[in-house]
């Protein structure tokens, strides 16, 4: 966890104090269930809640000696509870505590991430409707293609992050399971009803079958989902970075008063936030692979996954939380330049309308091969003139073209509004009745 890329609410979920508090609640709820089943005295269960406590520094001190974190925790709690503490952890194994705790932490972290996505979606939606009919050039291979609108670009992002939100909700459900099944998951020394009780109290589902640990395919899917969302962040960030290039400059990150872009060149206004988001996305995606490699453990368990999850659990969720919040700020304050968008649309002498002329020629009886050749030979003249020549004028003076289409019919194919006629349909699909 890097403080520079962290926000306090998410960090708190992964702090030792929070982790040990969840451990305590797991143990206390399990003891309550054991008391209801008559396995341990009711007074012992009550004493754990009333006198139970722990000290993080003391746990660290004990662990330095015993080399076992759960035993160190239980010893610290016993120092607060007294004799009744011997009834804690009856029939349980360490993974019952560790895995169930991780499920709680991931569920809580996911709730924050879902809220982050909701805020991002709200901002993207606002900017989409703001620029719903703001025309700009669409690009394929980085080259001018045909007109789109900037609002439609934002609608694309909205649809993508909406899918990410749906996946995250599914991933939360998948990973929020509880295992209190004892050594090798047989329930030999603890009743399954204890597991059900703990799951209900902590807002989890019962793990159908655990092998002393919760199966790690759940976690693999979870971290893969975070990686996909990170890729969506990078996609939008990369789009903004390209649009801010000097030669394009159709949109730009907000540049605050007093902000500096370069230590050497005072004129610079760099897309540093979206560049940062590109880097953070790489890190979040990197955690998906070790999560997948955690799936294949030895027999009923080993702990090769443990060290991995101590890294990726906090780091992936903390980083994604920060990245989503940063992207929300970028989109919220993004400077959009419609005049520059129009200037770029007009830059190449009307080449963006070539397909409409091609199709019109085929409708007029010209073969597609000949129509393509006629339009392309004029288009290449415009291309090579860097837009100084006009495709419309060249086509209107080409005898082979006007043999099939009148000058007025050719001019009609250069109407920008034609390309925007289905924007409402696209928006209705993305935003529904809004």
Image (cartoon, rainbow, N blue to C red):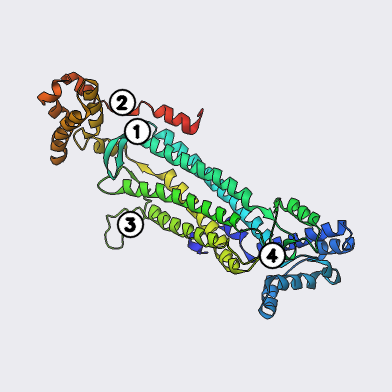
Q: Count the marks.
A: 4
Give the residue displayed 55% in from the left and 43% down from the top: 166
Which numbered disc, 2 or 1, marks the residue that appears first in the sequence?
Answer: 1
Asked whether residue 396 appears in the rendered view, the answer is: no
Disc 2 versus disc 3: distance between alpha carbons? 40 Å
- Pointer 1 local density, CA inside 10 Å: few below 14, some 14–19, many at least 20: many
Residue 27 lies, in percent from the top left, at: 76, 62
- Pointer 4 local density, CA inside 10 Å: few below 14, some 14–19, many at least 20: many
Which numbered disc, 2 or 3, marks the residue that appears first in the sequence?
Answer: 3
Disc 3 versus disc 4: distance between alpha carbons? 50 Å
From what the image shows, is residue 64 above or below residue 201? below
The residue labelled by disc 1 is: 134
219 lies left or right of 354: right
Residue 197 lies, in percent from the top left, at: 78, 53
Residue 225 lies, in percent from the top left, at: 52, 51
Assess whether mark 4 and mark 3 are in contact (beta carbons under 8 angstroms). Answer: no
- Pointer 3 local density, CA inside 10 Å: few below 14, some 14–19, many at least 20: some
Instruction: Describe the element under mark 1 as helix, strand or loop.
Output: loop
- Residue 20 occupies quadrant: bottom right
Assess whether mark 1 and mark 2 are in contact (beta carbons under 8 angstroms). Answer: no
Asked whether residue 355 appears in the rendered view, the answer is: yes
Between marks 2 and 3 in the image, the one whose residue lies nearer the viewer? 2
Which numbered disc, 2 or 4, marks the residue that appears first in the sequence?
Answer: 4
- Pointer 2 local density, CA inside 10 Å: few below 14, some 14–19, many at least 20: few
The residue labelled by disc 2 is: 418
The residue labelled by disc 3 is: 261
Between marks 2 and 4 in the image, the one whose residue lies nearer the viewer? 4
Which numbered disc, 3 or 4, marks the residue that appears first in the sequence?
Answer: 4
The residue labelled by disc 4 is: 95
Residue 75 lies, in percent from the top left, at: 76, 73
């Amino acid at each position: 966890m890097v403080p520079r890329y962290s926000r306090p609410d998410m960090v708190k979920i992964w702090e030792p104090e929070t982790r040990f508090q969840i451990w305590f609640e797991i143990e206390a709820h399990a003891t309550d269930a054991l008391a209801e089943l008559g396995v341990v005295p009711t007074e012992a269960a009550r004493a754990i809640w009333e006198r139970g406590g722990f000290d993080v520094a003391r746990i660290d001190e004990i662990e330095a000696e015993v080399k076992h974190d759960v035993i160190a925790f239980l010893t610290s709690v016993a120092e607060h509870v007294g004799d009744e503490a011997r009834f804690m952890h009856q029939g349980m194994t360490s993974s019952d505590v560790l895995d169930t705790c991780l499920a709680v932490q991931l569920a809580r972290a996911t709730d924050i991430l879902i809220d982050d996505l909701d805020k991002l979606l709200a901002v993207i939606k606002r900017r989409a409707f703001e620029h719903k009919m703001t025309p700009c050039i669409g690009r394929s291979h980085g080259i001018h293609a045909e007109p789109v609108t900037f609002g439609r670009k934002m609608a694309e992002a909205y649809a993508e992050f909406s899918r990410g939100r749906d996946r995250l909700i599914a991933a939360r459900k998948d990973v929020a399971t509880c295992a209190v099944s004892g050594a090798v998951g047989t329930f030999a020394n603890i009743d399954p009803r204890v597991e059900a009780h703990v799951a209900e109290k902590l807002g989890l589902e019962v793990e159908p079958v655990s092998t002393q640990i919760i199966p790690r395919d759940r976690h693999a899917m979870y971290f893969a989902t975070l990686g996909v969302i990170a890729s969506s962040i990078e996609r939008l960030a990369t789009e903004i970075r390209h649009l801010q290039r000097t030669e394009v400059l159709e949109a730009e990150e907000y540049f605050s008063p007093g902000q500096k872009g370069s230590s050497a060149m005072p004129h610079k206004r760099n897309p540093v936030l979206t560049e940062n988001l590109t880097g953070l996305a790489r890190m979040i995606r990197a955690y998906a692979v070790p999560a997948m490699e955690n799936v294949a453990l030895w027999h009923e368990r080993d702990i090769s996954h443990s060290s991995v999850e101590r890294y990726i659990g906090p780091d992936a969720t903390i980083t994604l939380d920060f990245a989503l919040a940063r992207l929300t700020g970028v989109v919220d304050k993004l400077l959009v330049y419609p005049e520059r968008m129009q200037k770029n649309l007009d830059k190449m002498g009307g080449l963006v309308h070539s397909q409409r002329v091609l199709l019109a020629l085929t409708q007029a009886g010209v073969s597609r091969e000949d129509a393509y050749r006629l339009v392309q030979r004029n288009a290449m003249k415009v291309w090579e003139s860097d837009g100084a020549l006009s495709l419309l004028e060249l086509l209107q003076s080409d005898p082979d073209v006007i043999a099939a289409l009148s000058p007025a019919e050719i001019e009609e194919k250069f109407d920008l509004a034609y390309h925007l006629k289905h924007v409402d349909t696209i928006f209705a699909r993305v935003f529904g009745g809004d």
